[in-house]
Image: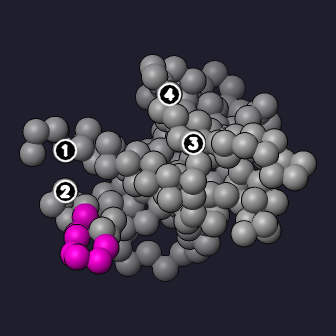
Amino acid sequence: MSLDRQTHQGEYGEAFVHVLAKAAGLQCDKRSPDRSGVDFAVGYPGEHGTVRYPQIEIQVKSWSRWPRDDDHEWWDYDGLSETQFNALAGLLQVPRYLVLVLVPDDPWEFTDADHFALHLAHAAYWVSFVDEPLIASPSKTKRRQVRVPKNNLLTVRSLLTLLSPALVEAS
């Protein structure tokens, strides 16, 4: 592999989310440089009834060492710094979400293809911190553990719902 393990895993996590956005027929724009604490702006490229050009922002984190025997209703993820958490927390003009992509330990297992499908391993989950208070004097090195509900599986339908429930009701 030409990329170091961490970069490869992160790029795969972003591609995973990008594929879901494209499958939903959405625009997915990479933020470059990433200076605002999000990786993508995802938006509906038009109008639907009274819904006009809805948009969300997403921070993607990939996780290869997730607990395989965890029977909780959420993932306890500790890969966000306090600064990264604050970029996602509270009420924002454009809603922001953390998307946690669970990936295999072995990069050779990220995908599997046959004549009928390309399979992406494993799954992605989303969470909003809109109701969470900001951390006073956040640190770039201190970690903030967050809970990501397992019911919040990121799919084409759930991604459209995050943009606007009206988009799903129309389909």
Residue bearing the label numbered 2: 107
Between residues 73 and 142, which one lies in front from this camera angle? 73
- Tell me where residue 103 appears, x and y as whole percent: 32, 60
- The magenta region covers 111-117
Which marked residue is nearer to the observer: mark 3 or mark 2? 3
Q: Earlier in the sequence, mark 1 or mark 2?
A: 1
Q: Quadrant of the C terminus?
A: bottom right
Residue bearing the label numbered 4: 31
Residue 116 part of the magenta segment: yes
> Do the numbered discs 4 and 2 sit on residues whose CB atoms are within 8 Å?
no
- Tell me where residue 79 appears, x and y as whole percent: 44, 45
Residue 104 part of the magenta segment: no
Distance CA(mark 3)–CA(mark 4): 13 Å
Q: Residues within 10 Å of mark 3 (few under 14, many from 20)?
A: some
Q: Check disc 4 and give the amino acid type.
A: Arg
139 relative to 145, above or below: above
Q: Is residue 168 left or right of residue 59?
A: right
Secondary structure category for the residue under label 4: loop
Q: Check disc 3 and give the amino acid type.
A: Gln
- Tell me where residue 167 appears, x and y as whole percent: 75, 59
What residue is drawn where x is 53% and y is 41%? 28
Distance CA(mark 4)–CA(mark 2): 25 Å
Residue bearing the label numbered 3: 27
Q: Earlier in the sequence, mark 1 or mark 3?
A: 1
Q: Residues within 10 Å of mark 1 (few under 14, many from 20)?
A: few
Q: Residues within 10 Å of mark 2 (few under 14, many from 20)?
A: some
